[in-house]
Image (spheres, rainbow, N blue to C red):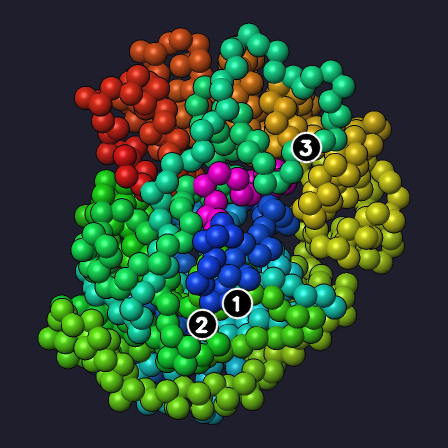
Amino acid sequence: MTTVRRAVLTLPAAPLGPDNPLPALHLLGGPGTPAVAEHERDGLPRDMARQLGHAPLRTVLPARVRDGYGRERTPTEIDALVIENDLLRVTVLPGLGGRVHSMVHKPTGRELLYRNPVFQPAAFALNGAWFSGGIEWNVGARGHGILSCAPLHAAVVPAPDGGTMLRLWEWERLRDLPFQVDLWLPDGAGHLCVGVRIRNPHERAVPCSWWSNTAVPEDRRILAPADTAWQSGYAHAPAPAQAPAPAHADTRAPAGTPAHAPAPAHADTRAPVDGPERAHLSAPVAPSAPALRRVPVPRTEDGVDRTYPLESTHAADYFYALPDGQRRWIAALDADGSGLVQTSTDRLLGRKLFLWGTGRGGRRWQEWLTEPGTPGYAEIQAGLARTQLEHPTLEAGEEISWLEVYAPLTADQAAVHGTDWAAARAAVEDALERALPRAEVDTAYERWRAAADTEPGPPLATGSGWGALEVLRGGHDVPGTPFDPALIGEEQRPWATLLSTGALPHPGPEPGAAPWPTPVSDAWRDMLETAPADPVTEYHLGVAQWAAGDLAQAVRSWERGLKNAAERWPLLYCLAVADREGGHPGRAAERYEEAFDDQEGGDPVVTAALGRETVTALLDAGRPARARAVLSRLPADVLARGAFRFLEVRLLLAEGRRAEARAVFDTGFEVADLREGAEELGELWARLTDGHTDEPLPDAYEFRMRPH
């Protein structure tokens, strides 16, 4: 019989550290974000063409960026839940997004997934911290979800076959949607069933995304029932940056420029003066990528068989073009024709392969996410849409659900690795049908749906209090996924007060501390607009308006709040970001500097985060002397971090101290929160060496994912 039990997993782990306390105002998009032009949509499936580019995120609000981790790992106990029967042992990490860490086939002792031997956060999620390995559940918007390293609620529920089922659930805040993931092992079966449901409890349509992401050893062949795929990669360089301003130039906005006129979210508002464009390395910025192009499977035009991840040089995504009516599946099989297959009911439409490739950048990323000398991985994914550039719509009151199955599979070795692609696919599909008939999966889904509303038992793990706050506000009925009002905690209490009294608590947080996190949905914004207009309320109202895309009105709210604010730095910070995003680097630098002066001596986590952005803004405005003054006021332990060593190199170059800048590189540093596709280190090295080709970027700094 299947059992679910608590366990403790001990791994070398880097602590997550504190979240970035500054509001995540930085706008997403811009150069490098995948975009498909209108003329490129000809020949695409109609629903795909309609959904491409639909409802992209403006920011990651209301989430906070998670960038408090480092690179030093120590043995750490991590809470786990183990689902087990005679054939499989599945280990789930409820405190880390409900990640399936391991799936072991007990008769052979074989691990079916890529199991990361360490826990090392990296800045791959939409809001920062993410880690590689296992099976992850990405809900909300394109990218690794904001819950990648966050706790989920967990409890036991009766399974459809009368056994035991593990339920995970949370309230996803980017799209304001509750979801659940039910995992169980049918009695006597050697496969894992996963029922997923996303609900829209609102009286409005909501865009959504879902991709189940499975890491598998990269020495596999990846098979899916398709002859073509849409490829997206990192081959195109970013758009040219604006010309740098002289260090002495007055880069303030021209006289008469309104302070409340930031550029639209789609504009190129970068203003790099002496290096990378990003205002904040942790601010989510999409890597450079071309539009989709359709390629043959398995061999692309250059003759390389992309179904073997180690045959590719550079990282790329392949979204398989599965024909309508085709059974949905994807498999990763080794040299013997054995491995893992993932299949589902038809609603989970898309299948994807992501590979790192064998180039220097891909290999460095593989080391960065685990340990040098350990095997690498590829990802096989399954999603609601054909590609990750699409956000399907959930209508008001609608819910969507499906069943996924993960199972060991063995197919004819000669066919799997033969040159006849149709025969290879047929061998896998035949083996899958014998082991797990399509009709059986459809029947299992219907039985699970009948159990999806069953109320769970006592909690095995606890998520956040945001779902409880939303249920309290909206009176939502979400059977099967309870959000207990008792879970409303410190971050949610001010908003419960707003609900009950019409005003936020007074006074706000302690001086120098970060403001409360701001919920930004329409309902909360409406309440803030009718609340007493004190500076704290104006701050939160501006954040909600900014998240909604009303950038000019957000600036007006922050300017009103600043007039009477005792605590000025939160409002100054918001105005500084607005100036930076609006293409006014000089004015942004001044406001950043004023905010830093006002906050200095308060919460040290805030001081470090604000100092990092302030130094960057001053450098981008061509003011190295003032950047040096701010940097010198930060504590030594902060200056020792890799991100600040990176800023030191930029500053030394701006000061004309090239030899000292080179010495920092030679000594070595690690910027823990480099983002996927990051090119900052390569760009800085090119400036440091004047682009001399006889001094290639050292391997330790090579994270570029496109050809050079």
Q: Which amino acid does label 1 sit on?
A: Asp
10 Å crowding of disc 3: few (<14), some (14-19), many (20+):
many
User: Residue visible at 61% across and 11% down?
Assistant: 250
Alpha carbon distance from label 1 to label 2: 12 Å
Alpha carbon distance from label 3 to label 2: 39 Å
Is 398 one of the magenta-colored residues?
A: no
Q: Does residue 435 appear in the picture of this structure?
A: no
Residue 165 locus on image (x, y percent):
47, 81
Tell me the SS state at disc 3: loop
Magenta span: 18-36
Residue 47's disc is: 1
Alpha carbon distance from label 3 to label 1: 34 Å
| Label 2 sits on residue | 349
Q: Nearer the viewer, mark 3 or mark 1?
A: 1
Residue 442 locus on image (x, y percent):
44, 87
Q: Which of marks 3 and 1 is nearer the N terminus?
A: 1
User: Residue visible at 36% across and 30% down?
Assistant: 681
| Label 3 sits on residue | 262
Q: Quadrant of residue 555?
A: top right
Residue 477 locus on image (x, y percent):
71, 75
Q: Does residue 624 appear in the picture of this structure?
A: yes
Q: Is residue 608 above or below residue 389?
A: above
Q: What residue type is labelled 2?
A: Leu
The residue lying toward the viewer, choosing from 437 and 238, is: 238
Q: On the rendered structure, is 153 left or right of 511?
A: left
Quarter holding the N terminus is bottom left
Q: In this view, does 650 lie above or below 197?
A: above
Do residues under tags 1 and 2 come within 8 Å of each other at their CB atoms? no
Q: Is the magenta stretch mostly helix, strand or loop?
A: loop
Tell me the SS state at disc 2: loop
User: Residue visible at 76% across and 19% down?
Assistant: 256
Q: On the rendered structure, is 24 left or right of 415?
A: right
